[in-house]
Image (cartoon, grey):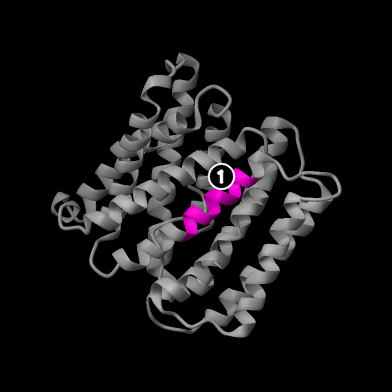
Amino acid sequence: MAGAVALFALMDAGLKLLAPHYPPLQVGALRGLSSLPFILVWIMATVGPRSLLRVRWSLHLLRAVLGIAMMAGFVYGLRSLPLTTAYAITFVAPLLVTAMAVPFLGEKVGPRRWFAIGVGLVGVLVILRPTGEGMLTLGGLAVLLAAVCYAASAITVRLLARTDSTQAMVFWLMALMALGSALLVWRDWRPIQPAHLWIIAGVGVAGSLAQVALTEAFRRGEASLVAPLEYTALVWGTLLDVTLWGVLPDRVTWIGAAIIVASGLYLLRRERGQSGEAASAPADSLHP
């Protein structure tokens, strides 16, 4: 899991490098297209192509729509936000998953969990700072929208996991996201600059290896023990921000991130030891 998070951080750094040069939807399409060849190799080496056809198409299409919106929002936010700040906002996604599980999955959430969710949302407000310094930016709101879309997508994963393979969920998400994003941005598609080809290839390799590592992590370990390692993204985000862009998040961002992480760890501790789908691994990461 730690390796998966590090690889996703490298992938996101590539997306941030591409973001100033191409529309967000084009970056999303490039992310999907660059990963598909490697994902197909993984599928052939594990379950074979037949598992890709016996799927619940309606949920896959819904998940693709959510994935396109998630990727577009995340990439748009990366244009103006450091990786660390974007990660801190997306960490609210597990809290939103818990809240959405009540109406959509019929799960029961007690008052202590609702309190933890509320605390996590306060952490997001601290990062966005809607008053005072006026840091409530379009980039921050776009990443928050991406987190909401991720949470909704995670709900569909829990439904799809009852019938579809992990490989099918990963493949169709990437394929439909790439196709949908490409169609939506077709008229505004910008020619790929030769200097960016290595970045796109790196995004594909890192994203694919990260997805495989993530799947293996949840297959081999309990979700309540593996999931907290998602928060190591803050370390990688900080290192990449300093190395590539020479920026560091400010103190208020760290305070907000600490609040969100603390509330997320509390929720994971409450869920530890519980059986069922909610405790098993979703096939997604907090990083689109």
* Residue 150 painted magenta: yes
Characterize the magenta stretch by its predominant secondary structure.
helix
Comparing 75 with 1, the one in front is 75
148 sits left or right of 178 in the view: right
Quick check: 69 above or below 204? below
Q: Residue 169, image x and y in percent?
A: 30, 55
User: Residue shown at 40%/27% (left/top)?
Assistant: 185
Quick check: 174 above or below 165? above
* Residue 133 painted magenta: no
Q: Residue 103, image x and y in percent?
A: 44, 73
Quickly name the residue at label 1. Answer: 9
Outermost residue toward the right?
132
Residue 222 shows up from this direction? no
Give the SS element for disc 1: helix
Q: Amino acid at mark 1?
A: Ala
The part of the chain drawn in magenta is 141-151
Comparing 185 with 278, the one in front is 185
Quick check: 175 above or below 90? above
